[in-house]
Amino acid sequence: MSATAPYAGPSPIRRPLAAAALLAALVSLVFGLLLAGAGPASAHAALTGSDPADGAVVDTAPKEVTLSFSEAIAVGDDSIRVLDPSGKRADTDTEPKDLSEGSTVRYGVALHSGLPDGTYTVAWQAISADSHPISGAFTFSIGAPSDTTVALPSQEAGGGPVGVVYDIARYAAYGGFVLLVGGSAFVLVCWRGGATALPMQRLVVRGWLTLTAATLVMLLLRNPYTGSGKFADAFDLAGLQSVLDTKPGAALVSRLLLLGAAALFIAVLFGTYARREDEREKKDLTFGLAVGGGVVATGIAATWAMSEHASTGIQANIAMPVDVLHLLAVAAWLGGLASLLVALYRTPDIGSAAVRRFSAVAFGSVVVLAATGIYQSWRQVGSWSALTGTRYGQLLILKVALIAVLLAVAWFSRRWTGRLTDSAVASEEACEEEPESESESVSADPDPERAAQLARQRAALTATKKKRIRDADPQRSGLRRSVLAEAAVAVVLLAVTTMLTSTEPGRTEEEAAGGTPSASAPAAGGPVNLKMPFDTGGQNGKGTVRIDIEPGRTGSNDLHVWIDGSDGKPMDVPELKLALTLESKDIGPLPVVPDRLAEGHWSASAVQIPMAGDWKIDVTVRTSDIDQVTIDKNAKIG
């Protein structure tokens, strides 16, 4: 149902136009606030550096390998593995050592002494503070690069069939929460008579069952999801115990305990409450159920906030309650929408008053969603480039567009709500009235079995008449169709929201890639990290060039270039050339022709930077005999 104010008579044209203008202003405000600057905020942890660096060639074997991350992570045995050129373990530690100091998050493993020359592979896997698994690999060489026989897993952490099932369970959990909380709120706030309606009871109970089952699946799959990726490990008791010791595991167990309290709430709502006839007693019980149900719903919503994006990064103490409000508003709106849809299609008794009360609830929910969504978007995106250039930002744009479509459809629902009357309900009640002679004939029948049969026939006839009158009411039919359209959009919206919770936020992705374009280079005198997308226009001509220049000062520098294809995997090209130009001093272009080290990886040593300044780096990529492109980016060096 629409997020609109309760109907108060025919609405002039200016009201829809004013609301449309308000919606446009809200959308503009969302994207405008995304541009506001803020301190760094992280959600998925990202590898920010290593020693030795990726692609580095060192003269002598290091004593240890260290990795630095953008935020706190959870590590376990074999979280960091160093493999020699033949694929054998070159590190001595099964569990990484925590070398963190202050705000710097760093872990390391010691290496065996006397390691031979060649290229070594470092494979790592950990769990972000927001519960998502992360993994990666890089290489360094001792003495000189060499060929390796290391075979790393092709799928990322959290991927594969286990990842698919886990993501489905995550979506089902959100859906179950929406139906459980939204359906219960709809009955208590909008339509108390719905407590006796069997379709409404089924909707809420199915929401509870879905959320409970999905939570159990996520708890069992948590160990293989963040580790081996094998379904068989779901019943590993040691792995399950390790999951229970983590923040996500504790959140899932807490959710199951709260669902036990929710089961008691459902039993009272559709049992004692539904049978209560005294209005005063029912009013008191409504208040008690509202308070108790609100506490349980808030607790369940908090199990997401305490273990996902809201629990990490800046202002976590603000972000977590904001996230709880956001989830409750989503449940009240979309769950109420599903309840209204069921009531309109499966029950003949809901009247216009209940529909209008939900309209007010939906309006309040959208106001809360707008406020909390603006804050969440600012916190997780923070810039235009992250909004348009990252997967998280693109999904966020899609979510805002779906909300706009949902609100547009809701205006049609509001029009049908304005026309809706209780005449159909009155007609249906009239159907229940039978001639007195018929009633007396049934009650006077001396055969109890015959009387029961006649009563069943009479009930079936009354139900048929109710359904016929309900389906013939054009206002009710129009409202059903528009609410069905809203529900269809809401299903897609919920799917996009679920994808957002498992996607690396745009701000973090840009930090991991070396900063936003507005800050294309690090501080003077430091390593330079650039990321440049390209498209030669031919087949398989799209990809990304990543460049590292160390130490990023005047004099001799080491330059490494990686090329990733559109699928994110290393990509070889027939020709790669670079040139450096200091336009302010008319120096250059200075050509650089790197040597290929491995698939998608080139390197050039002793690259001379004669003067500090804002250097333009031109990269020419050729992907076929005729497909070639030159891209450039500026970096401050020296």
Image (tube, rainbow, N blue to C red):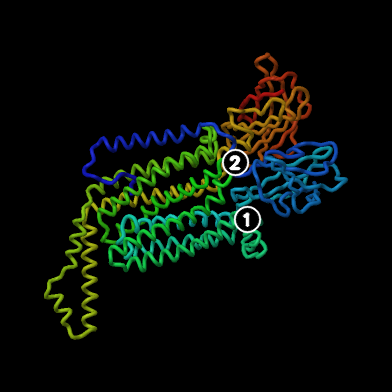
The residue lying furthest to the top in this view is 586
> Dot 1 lies on which element?
loop
Residue 556 x %, y %: 78, 25
**In the rendered view, does 182 fall on the left or right side of 154?**
left
Image spot of residue 397 (x, y percent): 47, 39
**Tag 1 residue:** 246
Residue 57 against residue 631 in the figure, above or below: below
Question: Residue 469 at what x, y percent from top left?
Answer: 21, 60
The numbered mark at residue 337 is none
**What amino acid type should be assigned to the residue bearing mark 1?**
Thr
Distance between the alpha carbons at the discs numbered 2 and 1: 19 Å
Q: Residue at x 25, y 48 (%)?
A: 416
Label 2 Cα crowd, 10 Å radius (few <14 / some 14-19 / many 20+): many
Numbered mark located on residue 42 in the image:
2
Whether residue 605 is situated above or below residue 97 in the rendered picture: above
Q: Amino acid at mark 2?
A: Ser
On screen, 200 above or below 499?
A: below
**Residue 582 in sight here:** yes
Sequence order check: which comes first, mark 2 or mark 1? Answer: 2
Residue drawn at 35 percent across, 45 percent down: 363
| For residue 163, side relative to residue 19 (left or right) | right
In terms of depth relative to the viewer, which is nearer, 358 or 529? 358
What element does badge 2 sit on?
Answer: loop
Q: Is residue 88 visible?
A: no
Quadrant assignment for the C terminus: top right
Q: Quadrant of residue 72?
A: top right
| Residue furthest to the right | 114
Picture coordinates of residue 150 (x, y %)?
75, 48
Front position in the image: 113 or 100: 100
- Does residue 486 appear left or right of residue 498 in this picture? left
Along the line of sight, the residue nearer the viewer: 44 or 192: 192
